[in-house]
Amino acid sequence: MPNLGREKEMLDVLGLNSMDDLFTNIPDEIRRKEPLPLPAPQSEEEIWSDALKLLGTNVTLDDKPNFLSAGLVRNFVPTAVSMLATRGEFLTSYTPYQPEVSQGMLQAMWEFQTLISELVDLPVANVSMYDASTAAAEAITCAVRVHNKAATQKDTVYVSEFTPPHRLAVIRNYTQGSGIEIKYLKHLPDGYIDPSSVRDSEGCCAIYVEQPNCFGVLDPSLVDIKEVVGKDTALIVGVDSVSLGIIEPPGSWGADIVVGEGQPFGIGPTAGGPIYGIFACGNKYTRQMPGRIVGLTKDTEEKRAFTLTLSTREQHIRRHRATSNICSNETLIALMGAIHMSLLGPEGLERLALRVAANTELTKASISSIEGLELVDTNSSNFREFRIKLPDKASSALSFLDDHGVIAGLDLGIWWDSLDCCLLIGVDERTSKSDIKQLHDGLSLWLKEVLK
């Protein structure tokens, strides 16, 4: 029961006669007349029991054979990652402004930066970004700040037309208020970048491409782009971080900035977040890069010490003159990524990438053998994902296969209306032959229904 004496005391202080007087500014016609249909009070046991029933209605990516990827992956994270990352020293640590009390976390983040730099073959990496999309958008604005004086197409950036719409939306949000013009690089029917489109971009501030692209296509022509666009245009490359276990890192073929999703290392899809993005660049961009950098130095006793350096926390003082509006990072999640990468090591990363690549080819071979389905990028090599064209809407196939116990992929009509009959199929290191067979059999059954 409410404490009526205390309630009256508060109302007297407010100069009101009743609780109803608090809500007189709400029009009567939109007020709820009946009380909310809430259940009676419950004990903790009863609440927990009901919560488990509600949670049991959810379907996770592990409950069925899963071929949904589209930027986030159903990866396997070793138990040691969470066991170490949830130690009190890490879990309760605050942003390390004071290096004298934060050496452990600062060293962990310095190790993370080192791992990312080695992964992409660029000299500088920051402590992390929010995700791949914010990393890509920040890379573009960073490149414009560096190159807009030398570029003939001032404040112009060319972006692959196959940039996923959710990522492009973030890029547009970042650029629309700063006068940056976005133009598009065209692709050939085989999924590769059109070389003439690259030549047309000459003189712009930056080019953004992804390797592999959003359809999983590995484009060998990307290694020649930097030679075409020259030193006054930044080449920004978005990557699948796992693929770098077996394909050449972008830094070794001319990329100036490399961004990507770090999520495959350290954390599952987590319903879209929290995750973290990676950002690495050449020395030319260091003072314009977003986020935080941990530096290694020596203290007054000549002992090794770590500290934040070139931090864009400056925006609290400089405001509109700051290099970035990102003043934080996904420290704990990035720590989990660093632990995961350390556990894998170079050989483990290579084996992981090979498993994903092998499962990609096994699935492609199985699905392309179904008469009536068409592999779209027929002559390309793929990593993790590939697209198929169906004789009917992809949404119909997904619904049918869901009823038959398979999460079959992404309806590409969600991204582009013209691809509503295309299905994006993704795999991971845990995709089994049994999973592939269930997808094959489910699609075959669906085709029989469609073609009746």
Image (cartoon, rainbow, N blue to C red):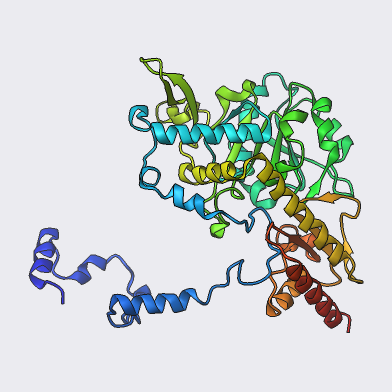
Q: Does 127 sit left or right of 9 as displayed?
A: right
- Determine the image quadrant of residue 372: bottom right
Q: Quadrant of the C terminus?
A: bottom right
Regarding residue 310, the answer to whether it shows in the image is: no
- Please count the marks in the image: 0
Q: Does 85 sit left or right of 265 as displayed?
A: left
Q: Residue at x 50, y 76 (%)?
A: 56
> Where is 396 relative to 147, above or below?
below
Q: Residue at x 29, y 79 (%)?
A: 42
User: x and y percent of residue 179 in the render?
Assistant: 63, 33
**Residue sitting nearer the eye, 426 or 147:** 426
**Which residue is farthest front?**
347
**Which residue is farthest bottom?**
452
User: x and y percent of residue 58 in the render?
Assistant: 54, 73
> Where is 119 relative to 309, above or below?
below
Regarding residue 118, the answer to whether it shows in the image is: yes
- Determine the image quadrant of residue 341: top right
User: x and y percent of residue 104 in the render?
Assistant: 41, 34
**Residue sitting nearer the eye, 165 or 173:** 165
Q: Does 172 sit left or right of 127 as displayed?
A: right
**Residue sitting nearer the eye, 173 or 68:** 68
- Determine the image quadrant of residue 32: bottom left
Q: Quadrant of the N terminus?
A: bottom left
Q: Does 336 sit left or right of 120 as displayed?
A: left
User: x and y percent of residue 38 in the render?
Assistant: 34, 80
